[in-house]
Amino acid sequence: DTAGEEDHSRYNLRVLKKPIYDLRDSNIVSDNGPSSYNDSRIYYRPSLGSYITKKLNDQVISYARDTQLHYQYEGEDSIASDLSSIESLSLQDENDSRFFYSLGPKFLRLADLYSDHVQNNNNDNT
């Protein structure tokens, strides 16, 4: 005997198939019984266009995680001023740039940017 290869009529394999519609939709009725070509029951299924339109209308609009968001009051009443500015680094000492180099290879690019900025500020001040 084989491992149940002849038992095609006892198990409903359609239960294991990926559903076409979202299972939370209350107006979609699924048939979990065995399939039969003589089945005279009629099930309501909306057209694909109306289903997509309904889902788009119900969809909550949210921004992608990589979308740049602009805030009107960024830096207002803050001693740091605008957070996108690197000008606050001009207050730092050149010795502070050595700190970035001590953090290892992951921070080398940041250390290079910081040391170039400090050198440019020193040249502007002289």
Image (cartoon, helix red, strand yellow):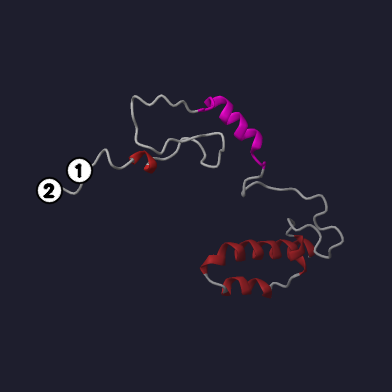
Instruction: Identify residue type, mark 1.
Output: Glu
* Rendering coords of residue 26 (x, y %): 57, 38
Q: Nearer the viewer, residue 88 or 5?
A: 5
Q: Residue at x 36, y 38 (%)?
A: 14
Image-quadrant location for residue 107:
bottom right
* Rendering coords of residue 78 (x, y %): 84, 63
Q: Residue at x 34, y 32 (%)?
A: 35
Give the residue at mark 2.
Answer: 1
Mark 1 neighbour class, 10 Å CA radius: few under 14, some 14 to 19, many 20 or more: few
* Rendering coords of residue 65 (x, y %): 62, 49
Q: Nearer the viewer, residue 97 or 2?
A: 2
Image-quadrant location for residue 109:
bottom right
Q: Is residue 40 above or below residue 74?
A: above
Quarter of the picture holding the C terminus: bottom right
Q: Residue at x 58, y 71 (%)?
A: 101
Give the residue at mark 1.
Answer: 5
Q: Secondary structure at mark 2?
A: loop
Magenta region:
44-61
Instruction: Identify residue type, mark 2.
Output: Asp
Q: Is residue 9 above or below residue 39?
A: below
